[in-house]
Image (tube, rainbow, N blue to C red):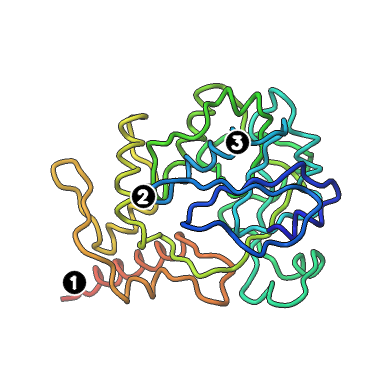
Amino acid sequence: MILGLTRQNHPPVELIIGVMQDAPYEDLPATDFPIRQIHIKGEELPLSKARNTVARAARAEVLAFVDVDCIPGPDMTQVYGILAQPGQGLLMGEVMYLPSGATTDDWSYDGFDQIAERHSDRPGPPKDALAPCKDYRCFWSLNFAMHRLDWDRSGGFDEDFTGYGGEDTDFGRTLNAAGIRINWVRGARVYHQYHPHCMPPIHHIPAILRNTEVFAAKWGHRTMEHWLSGFRMMGLIDEVDGALVQVRDPDEADFELCRQQEHMPYANTARVLRTLRARADQDASVVAAQ
């Protein structure tokens, strides 16, 4: 990620890292811009708190948020710097997914473009520099930017969301309720590096159940329903007296179903849901035949 920032056509003013582990990062690459590390205290992956903290600490007017597993394309900071004007709202750049091994040797952006894939749940970049996003649920926080005035108006991420899941959708809903625009952006690209992952994220069930209820208390309905549907179909959760509860821990068969394989640039909940529905249909056919 840092090497990508050193290869920008327009270098960043600074990099601020929200450190959510015990020790700061060491042996970071040399840069022509300052790097500050801020330790974020929290018992369970305080993502909302981390984003708010680094935003408050930043010196620049344009705030660009990039997940640590993403490599910024060479035009990212320049595009965001031009487009993130006061009143423009939130800008979502492009995300391309790299397969396993893409960054093990010397890498180049031309090489990335030959092998990277777009997520099947995401549209391609807009024809123009900007295009409105009409569904706040599309907001993903791994690559976005805002002018500080718009960020301050939004109030930042809700820190009642702790652990994995829900804070992005809540932030998108907050922007929508406040009349702050959400935009697709052409050119502010990042490349997501391969790492094993599960979708739906069965390794984060307690946090997801807690956060969906936080969302429901705030907005009147739950979020992350596609993940919850998968958990239900796998027999991992149930609803008891109106509350979602985990009924068992995932086993190896569950992880085998949901785990991202090395030939997959990204894990995909839709793929798992299709598999589960096909199994349910097959089971129903067997019962009917009997």
Left or right side of 8 for 201: left
Q: Earlier in the sequence, mark 1 or mark 2?
A: 2
Dot 1 lies on which element?
A: helix
Disc ID at residue 24 = none
Instruction: In the rendered view, tell whether residue 260 sits above or below residue 20.
Output: below
Q: Position of residue 125 (x, y in %)?
A: 72, 48
**Element type where label 2 sits in the image:** loop
Tell me the amino acid under the disc marked 3.
Answer: Ala
231 left or right, relative to 50: left
Query: Mark 1 near mark 2, Cβ–Cβ under 8 Å?
Result: no
| Among the two numbered marks 2 and 3 on one chain, the one whose residue lies closer to the N terminus | 2
Identity of the residue drawn at 38% across and 42% down? 223
Tell me residue 245's x, y (percent): 21, 51
- Residue at numbered disc 1: 287
Kind of residue indicated by mark 1: Val
Which of 37 and 262 lies nearest the eye of the viewer?
37
The three-letter amino acid code for the residue at tag 2 is Glu
Residue for badge 2: 43
Q: Residues within 10 Å of mark 1 (few under 14, many from 20)?
A: few
Q: Crowding at label 3, few (<14), some or many (≥20) Cα neighbours within 10 Å?
A: many
Q: Residues within 10 Å of mark 2 (few under 14, many from 20)?
A: few
Camera-side mark, 1 or 3: 3
| Res. 114 image quadrant | bottom right
Q: Secondary structure at mark 3?
A: helix
Marks 2/3: CA distance? 21 Å
Image depth: mark 1 or mark 2 in front: 2
The circle drawn on residue 55 is 3
Image x and y of residue 106, in percent? 77, 74
Taking 210 as reference, is 99 left or right? right
| Residue 206 against residue 107 in the figure, above or below | above
Residue 35 to residue 147: above or below: below
Q: Quadrant of the C terminus?
A: bottom left
